[in-house]
Amino acid sequence: MKRIANYPIERSEIAGVPVQRLATEFGGTPVFVYDAAKIVERYNDVKDFGVVRFAQKACPNLAIVKLLRGLGAKVDAVSAGELQRALAAGYAPSEIAYTADIFDEDALELVVGAAWGCVVNVGSPDMIYQLGARLGERARGLGLTLRVNPGFGHGHSRKTNTGGELSKHGVWYGQIHDCVDMATHFGMDVTGLHMHIGSGSDFEHLQSVCDAMESVCLAVGSRIRTISCGGGLPVPYETGGEYIDVSEFTARWHGVVKRLEESFGHAVTLEIEPGRYLVAESGSLITQIRSIKKQHETLFYLVDAGFTHLVRPMAYGSYHPISLARNPSNTTVADGEVDAVVGGPLCESGDVFTQEEGGFVVTRRLPKANVGDYLVLEVAGAYGAAMSSNYNSKFLAPEVLIESGVPRLIRRKQSFEHMIANEIF
């Protein structure tokens, strides 16, 4: 039976905690709120796939990373900062994969030093040369994995497509043997392959990775002991959207592993690298309506969150469900529904949460509201807080994690002093 998403347009609580309390107790609005139970639920969906490696770039708060570590997930890091976050959250280097298309100096220093023993998943031939040259004799016996660009890609937006000849990501599939030879020159070996074609891919494109991975593995040969299908598992952002059939996806990949094991004569470890799938639905961004006004015939709900807090609508034209949470202190309740544009406070025309790809502003059917009521931007746990900025000198929002009905602060609201701490005048 297909699972269908259903998002309300009005709510009073999140994970059993009143929206009003969440909006006022932890530094005010805007505020990100995460439901730990939803993260556990989504982890349980994929835990039988193989090794589950959390792509922490989706939501790198240490409390979230540590929560997933406690569930049994390993972790992926794409920068020196993420390597340090993983170590700070308690991960051993052997539980971390560093995946990138380059080594900057900070990341290379960590990989050969404090994070020595992590999986190095290289996305360009130069990374192999730079690692081998830095390690010298220490390189001998080191196993690497290659992120392979299979020649195609797909994502929820052209900007999240990570495959094909116009994508910067991964080693082009025709260059794999050259990379194996370079690794061998330094005494290293390519023992694993990784493919990630994009974030928010559909099932058809995700299935096509199975065939591509199997073909590449057979071409490289029995040195391969680990394969990773990357991430990109989609979640529905609109009511009526279908959830991916994870069991069917799992079965297809287990079939690939079985055939490879029969061909190679040894076990092959299967990994998956979800980010969005694990955390997107857990997260909500609570924001307060500060003004309601009309521009000719267009009604605007103007809120105190902007694209500095949730950039996905502006960057990708992404849709987020929006629900109204009434402020109990308002003495009157507006009945009925209206078509409204939801915009933020920033000095940018693109600071609108109800827009489509290409920057086209659209209205959303929402309950009638009063100034002081709250809007909840739903399915905001992935690439929400993670992509926040200080544009317009806006402070980063606090983050709250709800576990067993108890909310706790996991990131304080940024202060002015913290925002300017590294500036010199």
Image (cartoon, grey):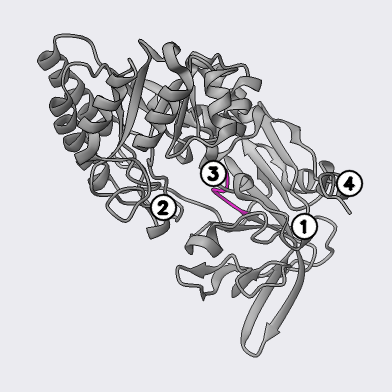
Q: Can residue 190 be seen in this snapshot?
A: no
Assign a secondary structure to mark 4.
helix
Residue 61 seen by the camera: yes
> What residue is shown at x 42% (from left), y 45% (from top)?
235
Between the C-alphas of marks 3 and 1, the distance is 20 Å
Measure the C-alpha gap from mark 2 to mark 4: 35 Å
Q: Amino acid at mark 4?
A: Glu
For label 3, the residue is 382
* Residue at the bottom extreme of this rendering: 296
- Residue that numbered label 2 is attached to: 160
Figure check: 151 above or below 299: above
Q: Which residue is at a point 20% across and 30% down the rendered structure image?
A: 177
Question: Quick one: label 4, few (<14), some, or many (20+) residues within 10 Å?
Answer: few
Q: How many numbered marks are there?
A: 4
Marks 3 and 2, the one that precedes in the sequence: 2
Q: Report the Cα–Cα distance between label 1 and label 2.
A: 26 Å
Report the residue marked by disc 4. Answer: 417
Magenta stretch in the rendered image: 377-382
Residue extending furthest toward the left = 263
User: What amino acid type should be assigned to the residue bearing mark 3?
Assistant: Ala
Residue position marked by numbered label 1 in the rendering: 394
Of circles 3 and 4, the one toward us is 4
Q: Which one is earlier in the sequence, the residue at label 1 or at label 4?
A: 1
Q: Amino acid at mark 1?
A: Lys
